[in-house]
């Protein structure tokens, strides 16, 4: 569901000081965001209130991935970061678009995973063509176009061996009829894509228009956490040329 807002993190989150992104995440972000400040060339606001459902560990990994990309000469918008946590079931909103400069959640959305990755919960991930599976890691958004799936956003995978074939596999962000709360209630899960992060039809365009043109997207799953950590440690981020 679209949750774009000009206000800071929703007021309901103030009651969750011991929740997912309460005081504990403040400590994490003091270290993670401080390290990322020079890399992003912006001063991210201190996140004193939470983004509902977003794990502080996943957010810290996303910031680390962006910092690593910058260290390897990859430029991108420093004020926006999209995080997807495929550890969560598809029936829960698991995509966040964060305004790092102002400390706001711009969107919190449902997002589908690939048919090759599992059913309600994604457990398998691939960089292989025809796998119809979701890829993890850090991506850079590109340009938009009108295609077979409607208004779509190109994604460039930045992690060698993990998502660097995203363009060849035609992995893009787009809207889909099978991504909705009604579909989740009726079938107990969202429909699945051929590997693309598909969004609700009514929300896809505003999300895409916000993050297009060179912002970072970080896709995570606890099922592949060792692989992602190894990628960050080895500095396998590839050039965005």
Image: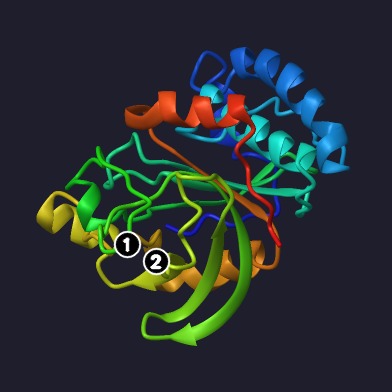
> Foreground: 219 or 74?
74
Count of numbered marks: 2
Type of colouring: rainbow
What residue is shown at x 26% (from left), y 64% (from top)? 130
Q: Quick one: label 2, few (<14), some, or many (20+) residues within 10 Å?
A: some
CB under 8 Å between callouts 1 and 2?
Answer: yes
Residue 80 place in picture, x, y as percent: 70, 50
Residue 55 can be seen in this image:
no
Task: Examine the image and state in which quarter residue 132 appears.
Answer: bottom left
Q: Where is residue 182 in the image (x, y as percent from the top left)?
A: 22, 61
* Image x and y of residue 217, in percent: 57, 50
Using the image, determine if residue 143 lies above or below residue 230.
below
78 up-or-down from 177: above or below: above
Mark sitting earlier along the chain (1/2):
1
Identify the residue at image location x=28%, y=72%: 177
Q: What element carries label 1?
A: loop
Report the front residue among 206 and 114. 114
* Viewer-side residue, 5 vs 123: 123
- Which quadrant is the C terminus positioned in? bottom right
Q: Mark 1 points at which residue?
A: 129
Using a 10 Å C-alpha cutoff, classify the residue at mark 1 as few (fewer than 14 neighbours), some (14 to 19) or many (20 or more).
few
Q: In this view, does 186 lie to the left or right of 153?
A: left
Figure quadrant of residue 129:
bottom left
As drawn, 173 above or below 4: below
Instruction: Residue under label 2, please give it.
Output: 169
Residue 216, position in %: x, y?
64, 51
Residue 181 visible? The answer is: yes
Rendered residue at 27%/40% (across/down): 89
Label 2: element kind: loop
């Amino acid at each position: 569901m679209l949750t774009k807002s000009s206000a800071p993190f929703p007021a309901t989150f103030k009651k969750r000081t011991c929740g997912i992104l309460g005081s504990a995440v403040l400590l994490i972000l003091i270290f993670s965001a401080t390290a990322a400040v020079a890399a992003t060339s912006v001063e991210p606001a201190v996140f004193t209130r939470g983004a509902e459902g977003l794990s502080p560990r996943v957010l810290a990994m996303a910031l680390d991935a962006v910092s690593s990309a910058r260290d390897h000469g990859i430029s991108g918008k420093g004020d926006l970061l999209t995080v997807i946590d495929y550890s969560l079931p598809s029936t829960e909103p698991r995509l966040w678009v964060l305004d790092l400069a102002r400390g706001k959640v711009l969107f919190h959305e449902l997002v589908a995973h690939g048919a090759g990755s599992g059913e309600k919960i994604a457990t398998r991930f691939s960089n292989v063509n025809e796998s119809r599976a979701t890829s993890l890691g850090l991506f850079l958004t590109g340009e938009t176009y009108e295609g077979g799936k409607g208004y779509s956003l190109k994604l460039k995978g930045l992690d060698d061996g993990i998502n660097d074939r995203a363009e060849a596999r035609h992995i893009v962000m787009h809207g889909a009829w099978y991504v909705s709360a009604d579909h989740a209630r009726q079938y107990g899960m969202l429909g699945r894509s051929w590997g693309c992060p598909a969004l609700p039809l009514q929300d896809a365009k505003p999300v895409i228009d916000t993050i297009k043109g060179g912002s970072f997207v970080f896709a995570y799953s606890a099922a592949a956490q060792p692989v992602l950590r190894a990628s960050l440690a080895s500095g396998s981020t590839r050039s965005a040329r």
